[in-house]
Image: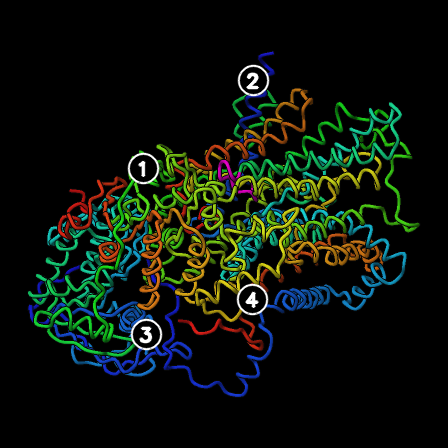
Amino acid sequence: MSSASPPDASPSDASPPGLAARLRQSLPDARLVEPAIIPLAALAVAAILFSGFLLVLGKSPVTFFSLVWTGGFSSWFSIQNALQRAAPLILTGLAFAIPARIGLTLLGAEGALVLGGFTAAVVALPMQGVGLPPLVILPLMAGAAMAVGAFWMGIAGWLKHARGVNETISSLLLTYIAIAIASFLIEGPFRDPGSANKPSTQPLGPDLRVGEMFGSSVHWGLAAGLVLAVVLWLVMARTSFGFAARMTGGNLRAAQGQGLPVGRLLVACCAIAGACAGLAGFYEVGAIHGQANASLAAGYGFTGILVAFLARQNPLAVVPVAILFGALDAAGGLVQRRMEMPDATITVLQGFIFLILLVSDTCYGRLPFLSYHQSGDRT
Amino acid sequence: MMTEAAPLRTRALSLTTEGITKSFGPMRALDDVSVQVGAGSFHALLGENGAGKSTLVKCVMGFYQADAGAVLLDGTRMALPSPRAAQAQGIGMVYQHFTLVPCLTAAENLVMARADAPAVLNWRAETRALEAFMDRMPFRVRLGAQVADLSAGEKQKLEILKLLYLDQRFLILDEPTSVMTPGEADEVLTLLRGMAERREITVLMISHKFREVKAFCDSFTVLRRGQVTGGGDAQTASVAEMSRMMIGETTLRERAARQDRVAAQPRLSLQDVSAVDETGRHVVERVSLGIGAGEIVGIAGVSGNGQSALVEVLSGQRPMTGGHMTVDGAPFSPRRADFDRFKVFGLPEEPLRNAVVPRMSVAENLAFRRFDKPPLAGRLGLISPARLRAEGDALIRRYNVKTRSADAPVETLSGGNVQRTVLARELSGDVDVLIVANPCFGLDFASVAEIRAQIMDQRNRGAAVLLISEDLDEILELADRIAVMSEGRLGPATAVEDTDRAEIGRRMGGH
Amino acid sequence: MSADLLIVFYAMIGGAIRVSTPFLFVALGECLTEKSGRINLGLEGNLILGAMVAYAVSYNNGSPWLGVLAAGGAGVVLGAAHGWICKLPKVNDIAVGLAFMSLGTGLAFFFGKPYIQPSAPRLASLPMGGWSQNPQVQQALQVNPLFFVGIVLAVVLWWALRNTRAGLTVRMVGDSAASARAMGININTVRLLATAAGGFLAGVGGAFLSLSYPGSWNEGLSSGQGLMAVALVIFARWNPLRCVLAALLFGAAGALGPSLQAIGVTYGYHFFNAAPYILTLGIMVASARSKSAAQEAPRELSIVK
């Protein structure tokens, strides 16, 4: 065993701090403000670098960002557009953030979303014919979608605990497998004969569509996302379950040493994540498409990863970040048309943001102009 | 590779440090340190943890650059900007942690250590040269074995052989015998001493074992808080003098005061407990032990013989592949419900790695045993942060944990205060079974005394204490009975009065 | 019936070789990177960007082999960037891999839009089926020289890791960073070079996709091959020679669907396409706790620590 910790200071060596040092010590500990400052700075740097990218290509960054503003924020129409697109991102963002708090890098949201959406579309069909009211069918659809999503992601968690399989790779593989399963079922046994060009399940009846909120054009999925974000924040930050999960994510060995049921906690967090993603699938089917088809795999699962990182895995912060990305998404079409750029433009911007954000991780604890308080006398 | 025999008198190097001073930020690690190590001597560098021994040798080795002072080799001032430069001058070091690469064989490790290793390796030629080298050496290691398969003692021997292979003539050894059985330690040190006497090498050994210093060294220097507090002839100085130079005016610790307890039925009982590592090898093999209320049973052993694995089994970090455990006759498994029911608590080794969550606050870490029960957990499992902090504050005051606030992340605390946090959490209630592993490693004398007093206190109050330690002196001071762990198997536990160091040493070596 | 079976057999062999070639290159690249102790999940991005760059350069220059080289170059850039970022303290290397996957794919789609329709010069294949009369068999056994290049590379890599100083240095850095540091080796430099070299190989693998098989550039070209290569390396227990066998196995799994389609079997198309993923998952489950994997894994790799 090597003694890697810094040597303890001898009491005779503390010289009285100068004025500058004392001023800095009176500021709050830098660690409190870092989680807010550093991601914002990363966003700014990414925006600057992307602007450079645009300039090199002969496009104007000013035009780009003003179009983003127009398309995402400037009018009630564009705000609604942004919120609409943010709804699934909140849920898929949560689907990454919750397992991240327990130390898992789970990428399976896309697969759980697709399976959840498919389940919702298919479960509704027999119930429609029987004459149950929509108020009963819709929650059942949502519940089924969440259950299937929870099961699917739970597999990755269980594999990690029982066999030590790396969850990043397994969840990604499960995503591809899920999409394959859904495609097979949609194009095969569950295909709607009327959907010749684009294989889909039978469309849901008009009364089974999830409505819009309070006369706006944003569907109830946004409210569901908000509620889940608050609930999950509460669970992770203020309940014993969340405390145990954070212990496990912070130091697995310490959690084991306290006798915590680590396996159950891992699977539970994966199941919660899968349920969130499944619910996103339900809203995609119930509110947007009305049926399950290839459009379900729209990449929300992967964008959710970036949302969660930018929100630093905090469920509450996921909401504003998701809205930001919803706005980017909403502006994407406008940018593409007006500036004659491919729709991969937003993807490139997201890639820049992700990368700079990860690089910014290195700044924690090392910012030169803030003060980091040491913890008292070190003996 | 060893050159042709140069005249004996010029092989071993002499080293002098003059006024070495080194600071890390506001903390002065070394203060005007001047040490003289004559050519061909076997010199001991003594001092307690944190005295500056490692820092000093790292300056000599070129890892650190001293702020002031100089290093002289054979009387000439030397610039040692990097470890490679030091090695080029013939200075080599064996560290406490191994610098061998586990996936490579011993031969590959030796050849790669050479600065002049060729770009393309001709293994037939290299192996022949290595065999020739081994024949000249006083002890051998299997060349074709993968380092991962070597025992700790063999690895340490290989480390020393590596230095000799590289023709280093000033060897620095950092606590070299801590991973060896007493027999292996004696073998290696005797052979090195022989080479030193023949002036083939000079040895500077960091140690805190007076016995070894008296048996093998001819001279010594003592560091305390970064300053030289004494030195001299190791053969004529007494252990008491050396100790006084090391720790100042405190008496040697005697056996801790204890109340007499009558050992009744064992409270904690292990029967045929076994566990394997990830390659399927048994690291714990059919261990059986009984610990009664109000006694301390110590498990001694050289590091790496399964003690850590046994603690991991008891605390739930490693699955048990055979046997069973009971507390007061009832089956016990390392789950939270059983920990609470049987009042089992633990002070694991390396607390930052095993007992705390570094990023969580001190208050949260203090709440690890209580966060899922009332009064901290209310309905629906909701935790009140205010109550959590209040409880934390109370424990911080009671156990004297030095932290800026209860909300500071526990990783910002010094080693002693991290251990105090764990103590506060584990020992503040009723303890029936206590499992302690290497509790004082790397801590200063004051913390060490405090922790040992706490352990003794729990024993006197009736807890069944299992103490696992690589520090034999610690076990001899605290334990009522001693058992020795060797290669995953546990020998019988005998009362401390009925055994002595020599016998324990034999058992540690597997005899 | 037996004629059909024979066709499927040869189609499988040819298909296995074809589909395995990009796997082989990416796996060798990841193997080298992981031997140095770093995991690069971003190779999917290298693959796709390499495919686009190769196609674009080949189209603009008329030389497919120049395209291959350019694809390798793009891979080096991404790999070096990955290596440079990961050496910064506290950076999460798995997340960085994901970011590069995203960025590589985004850049490829962004710049690759104009190249979707046009037809670029492809890499010529060696006709290995000349001995057969059957045109289908002849078609099946067209083998691209890159396959043989890949095998030679695997052998060279295996040899170099045991018999050269550079190779042993890479293994040292990947197994015990502390030991390497004690020898004065700059760990970050070694890992950066290994990651860059790995990126080069992955880029070349991508070039194969667009310039040989399937032989065109579009946005659905790859679906996770880069990720599967990571699992492949674990399955091959970080041995370059076993990577060849594993790549062939994965190639056979991936060739199952198209081979069956060749004789008219289209039912279960999706499942056959999912076969490589299922195989990968099965392999990961089987080898996760395996003892030999534990012994042979580079100990500095973050996913096995």
* Boundaries of the magenta span: A160-170
Quarter occupied by the C terminus of chain B: top left
Residue C248 included in the magenta stretch of the image:
no
Q: Position of residue B369 (x, y in %)?
A: 50, 51
Q: Chain of mark 1?
A: B
Q: Earlier in the sequence, mark 3 or mark 1?
A: 3
* Residue in the picture at 21% in, 70% down: B251
Residue marked by disc 3: B81
Q: Are marks 1 and 2 in contact (CB under 8 Å)?
A: no
Numbered mark located on residue C6 in the image = 2
Distance from Cα at disc 2 to Cα at disc 4: 62 Å
Few, some or many C-alpha atoms within 10 Å of disc 3 (few <14, some 14-19, many ≥20)? some
| Residue B476 makes an appearance in the image | yes
Residue under label 1: B282
In 3D space, how far apart are the residues under numbered discs 1 and 4 (Cα atoms)? 42 Å
Name, please, the residue furthest toward the bottom. A19
Residue corresponding to mark 4 = A364
